Amino acid sequence: MKLLVSLSQKPPMTSVYSAEQVLNHEARIALSQDIASYDLMNSAGAAVFTQLLKSWPKAEHILVLCGKGNNGGDGFIVAQLAHKKNIKLSVLLSCAVSQLKADALLAYQAMIAAGAVLLIDKVEERNNAKSLACIDSFTGEVIVDALFGIGFTGQLKPSLQRLVLSINHHTAKVISIDLPSGLCATTGQVHGANRDIQAIIADVTLTFIVYKQGLLTGKAANFVGTLLLAPLALNNAFTRRVKTNHYYSQYKQPLNLAKRLPASHKGISGLLLAVGGGLGMPGAIRLASEAALRCGAGLVAVSCHASNQAIIMYGRPELMLAPTTAELLDNSAPLHQAKTYLIGPGLGHDNEAEQLFTLLCATSQATKKNIILDADALIWLSKTKLSNTRLSKMKQHYHHWVLTPHPKEAAALLHCDIASIEADRFAAVSAIAKQYGGVCLLKGAGSLISDGEQIVINNSGNAGMASGGMGDVLSGIISALVLQSDDVFSATCLAAYIHGAAADIIANNNGQRGLLASDLFVPLQHLLNGKIPSH
């Protein structure tokens, strides 16, 4: 029985949306549920205030920063509720009162009528010393960020950058309404080289109705803090009526995977042929190969440079050795008996690496076997777009491979710069999957998985994974699960999750610093067997 066949459903996922989708449909969906826009604003503000008290129950003094749009209106509601609760209150307004319109103006008027204290200051003007002095002198516990909503794009103006810098350097906790001001809700992009002025750095972000995709990937992780969702009684209606092909994975432990039949043998799981480990680079392919064993591959054969064979075998005799060159590997038993191929970790950039890459891809394409391309193999793949080379003759669009680039490798595949990848990770992963075929996993915080039709955002992992070898382990996990599955896309999504989940277990026990790729092997085995390791 294949590993994922007995799962009751596809990867458990929550729909996520772009800012444009929410802005275009929110009012219509609310109207269909007989919820007036001002009532929705009151619900949003109440949800923020409730979360503020839950996160910081001893808060006695709060500062609310309000913009001129609906996000600012939510902030006025928070201020009104805080005043009624006898919480000391300061309010900063980023515009003149005359610029407030519609529901935001109503919320402002309600706040004034309730007797809340307001400090009006046009912080968008060049000299916003009064605002900065107010923030610097604030001695309370919580700052509420209600400056910009999900319609914000671009870069903060210099005066607002100074304001954001002052908030980010303050000791008070920060709760952002819907998203941290300065962050793009669709792409997660921020502008500027200095994190402290790019966007508000929140401790908690409470987003409304549905998750916005930009809050879940890439640089957004530097700003959103703990991300929470307030459905506001619209989530179900919104997700039913507004279609999306972007999702947030929602795996929960213990995982419910198929158990092996009592009479199973290693041939049922099958043989993985792992190719890499060029001269002087044994570690990457060793990590990938051992990860594949720990994730259920029946057999793993490693083709590497002859000088690396003893190192790769040392301490892991379960690994087998395959021929070391393309000439020897061609027509060999490992090449033809393997059910799945992995190529790339430590492969190198010399002529032999090119021959191995060409052989594995050509054989995979001729036999329709799945192949995982990682690391150096992705660089070789990017060169297939160049004319007058041997690589240009191979198929450049193939449905049976999984590509696992980090942003630099993604930039090579799309022949652009890294900044273009990070500016819109959703567009990048989709473009790679459509251009090259198969499945693409774009690494990074909130890794993205796409088959060209849908995108899944991974929900596990932590900053401790920013260490050498983590990507190699991931390629081994993907290879093992693809080997055992009939659904390559679902296997890749699950691999991304358990990779991050294993790292989360180690980080929760020992901390993030010093986390090694090889530390993941034991929790990987626990996770795939439905066991939750003790913390």
Image (tube, grey):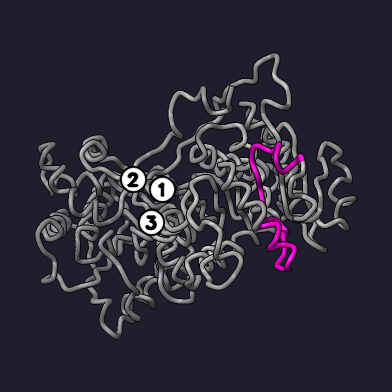
Whether residue 2 is visible here, answered yes or no, is yes
Q: Position of residue 381 (x, y in %)?
A: 57, 61
Asked which quadrant contains residue 76, the reply is bottom left
Looking at the image, residue 6 lies above or below residue 462: above
Which residue is more in the foreground, 243 or 196? 243
Q: Position of residue 331 (x, y in %)?
A: 74, 45
Q: Which is more foreground, mark 1 or mark 3? A: 1
In the image, what residue type sits under mark 1?
Answer: Ile
Question: Which structural element holds mark 2?
Answer: loop
Q: Which is more foreground, mark 3 or mark 2? A: 2
Q: Residues within 10 Å of mark 2 (few under 14, many from 20)?
A: few
Which residue is more in the foreground, 528 or 286? 286
Q: Give the quarter of the figure containing the C terminus.
A: top right
Which residue is more in the foreground, 392 or 239? 392
Question: Which structural element holds mark 1?
Answer: strand
- Residue on which disc 2 sits: 245
Choose the circle earlier in sequence order: 1 or 3.
Answer: 3
The magenta segment is 333-357
Residue found at the very far top of the displayed protein: 262
Asked which quadrant contains residue 3, the reply is top right
Q: Which mark is residue 147?
A: none
- Residue on which disc 1 sits: 455
Choose the circle earlier in sequence order: 3 or 2.
Answer: 3
Q: Do labels 1 and 2 touch, CB within 8 Å?
A: yes
- The image shows a total of numbered marks equal to 3
Q: What residue is drawn where x is 73% and y is 22%?
A: 265
In the image, what residue type sits under mark 2?
Answer: Asn
Looking at the image, residue 280 lies above or below residue 342: below
Whether residue 203 is visible here, answered yes or no, is no
As measured in the structure, the alpha-carbon distance from the residue carrying label 1 to the one carrying label 3 is: 13 Å
- Residue on which disc 3 sits: 214
Q: Give the quarter of the figure containing the N terminus.
A: top right
